[in-house]
Image: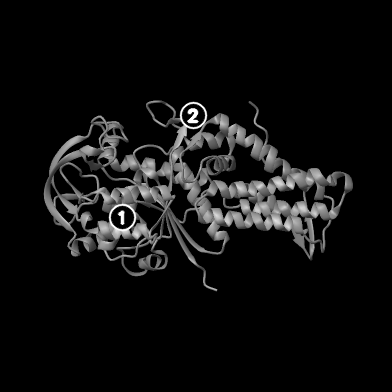
Amino acid sequence: MKKKKFYITTSIAYANASPHIGFTLELVQADAMARYRRASGDDVFFLTGTDEHGEKISRAACSAGTTPKAFTNKISKEFRALKTELDLSPDDFIRTSDKKRHWPGALALWKRIEENGDIYNKKYKGLYCVGCERFITRKELVDGRCPIHKTEPEIIEEENYFFKLSNYRDEVYKLIESDAYLILPESRKNEILSFLSAGLEDVSFSRSRTNLSWGIPIPKSDQTMYVWCDALSNYISALGFGRKGGSLRRFNKFWPADVHLIGKDILRFHAVIWPAMLMSAKLPLPKKLLVHGFITAGGVKMSKSLGNVVYPDEIVKKYGVDPTRYYLLREIPSNEDGDFSEEKFVERYTADLANGLGNFASRVLNLGADLVFRGERVSEAAELQIKRAKAMVAKHMEEFRIHEAMASIWELLKFGDGYVNETKPWKTKDKKVIFDLLMILEASAGLLEPFLPETSKKIKKCFRRRGGFLRVHKIKPLFPRIEL
C-alpha cells in the first residue's frame, strides 16, 4: 500500500538574533506532528530554516561589526543546533541566503507572477517599519508607532515593483471561508475574513538596491527582491522548485504543503499574500494553516529590554530535553498564548513527570521484573482505556490541540495509577493485573513517542518479547527529583 504524503513546515526564523523559547515552541509542535504522522505510516517531509535577508539584518550585522553573511552564518548555525538540543527530526533546513538551493525557486516564482501580469512598477512614498520589514498604513499605527515593535516608522520614497494583491481579494476570501485553505483556530480564520472584508491594497514587492543590497537581486533591474517573494518561497524552493532535473521530484511529490505552522504575528502574510502569490503563479495551494500564540514570561511579553527572554539551551541544560518538550507541548495551549515561568515548569515536572509518569513506570516495571508472561490477555477495562486514549490523541492532533492530546495520555496514566492503588498487586501478586498495568505503560510509551521521544524509547527498551514470551526489566528513574 502506497504511503500517504505529509508535508509540514514551520515559518523560517528571522536570523537577526539568537533563538528564544517562542520559536522553540513552534519547532517542538511541528516536530510532534511530524513524528505522529510518521508513526501513523505517512511519508513525512518536515521543513524548517532561517530567513536571512532584509534591512533589519543588515543593521544588526553592522551593529555587531561584521558582514550580513558572517552574521547570518552564525545565527543560522544556532538555529540548526536546536535539532540536537531539542531532539527534533526535520528532514531539511533551508536558508534564504543559499544561492544554489533557495534563489532559483524565489526567482522562478517571481517570473511566473510577472508573466501573469501581476507585477508592475511605480513610485511609492510610505511609512516603513524596519522591525516588520514592511510598509504599514497610518491606520495601523498606535500613538504614531508600530503596534508590534513600538517604534516610529520611517518615511521612505522610492520606485519599486508591486504585486497586484488587490486582484485576489475575492478568491482568497472564498478559499478561506470555504475551508479549502483551512485556518485553525477558528478565531484566526474569522480575523482574516474580517481583514479581507475591508479590501486589499497592492503590496511592495521589491526595494531599491541602493537602500537594500542584502537580498536577491532582480534580473535586469536596480531592485532587490522584497520579503514576500523571497521568504515565503522557501516552502517550495526547499523542495527543488526552480531547479532543473531530478531536483523537482521532491516538489512534485510533496507540494502542496499539508500544514504550514506559524505564529499569529505573521498570519496575514500566510493567509492572504502567500495564497494570492500561488494563485498568480498557477501553483497548488497549501491545505492547512495552523496558528499558535505567543509565550509570555511570568505574564509579561518577552523583551530583551526587559531582560525576560528565555533561551531554550539554558532550560534544556538545567532540566533536560524531554521535560522542556513536555512543558511547551502540555502547559502552552497549542493555539493560544501561554506563559513560561520556572516555577510552573518545576510544578509540572514534579507533578506530571517525576510523580506521574516516572513513578508509574518504576512501580509497574518493578512489579513485573521477576515474572514471565505468555498468553495473557488485556482485561476489557484496560483495553477500553487504551483504545480511548489512542482515539482521543488522534482526534486532538487532527484539530491542532497538542496540549489536549498529551492530556489524554495522562488520563490513561491516571487510570493506571488508580488501578494500581485499587488492586494492590504488590500484595496479591496477581499476574493478570500486573500484565494489564504493563500493557497500559507500553501503550502510553507508544503514544508518548511524538512528544517525549527519548522517554518513550527508554520505556520501550524495558519490554523484551521472544518466542511468545514477554519479560520486562526495571528502569532507572526517568525524572530525578529537582532539588530546589
> For the residue labelled by badge 1, is the local secondary structure a helix, a strand or a loop?
helix
For label 1, the residue is 274
The amino acid type of the residue labelled 2 equals Gly
- Residue 105 in sight from this viewpoint: no
For label 2, the residue is 298
Q: Position of residue 164 (x, y in %)?
A: 20, 56
* Residue 319 quadrant: top right
- Of 67 and 222, nearer the camera is 222
- The color scheme shown is one colour
Q: Residue at horizontal 60%, vertical 54%? A: 392
Determine whether, in the image, residue 159 is placed left or right of residue 464.
left
Q: Residue at horizontal 39%, vertical 29%? A: 304
* Residue 66 quadrant: top left
Q: Position of residue 260 (x, y in %)?
A: 41, 54
Neighbour class for label 2 at 10 Å: few (<14), some, many (≥20)? some
Q: Give above or below for 340 relative to 452.
A: above
Q: Residue at horizontal 21%, vertical 40%? A: 137
Determine whether, in the image, residue 410 is placed left or right of residue 76.
right
Quadrant placement of the N terminus? bottom right
> For the residue labelled by badge 2, is the local secondary structure a helix, a strand or a loop?
loop
- Of 315 and 426, nearer the camera is 426
Between marks 2 and 1, how big is the CA–CA gap?
34 Å
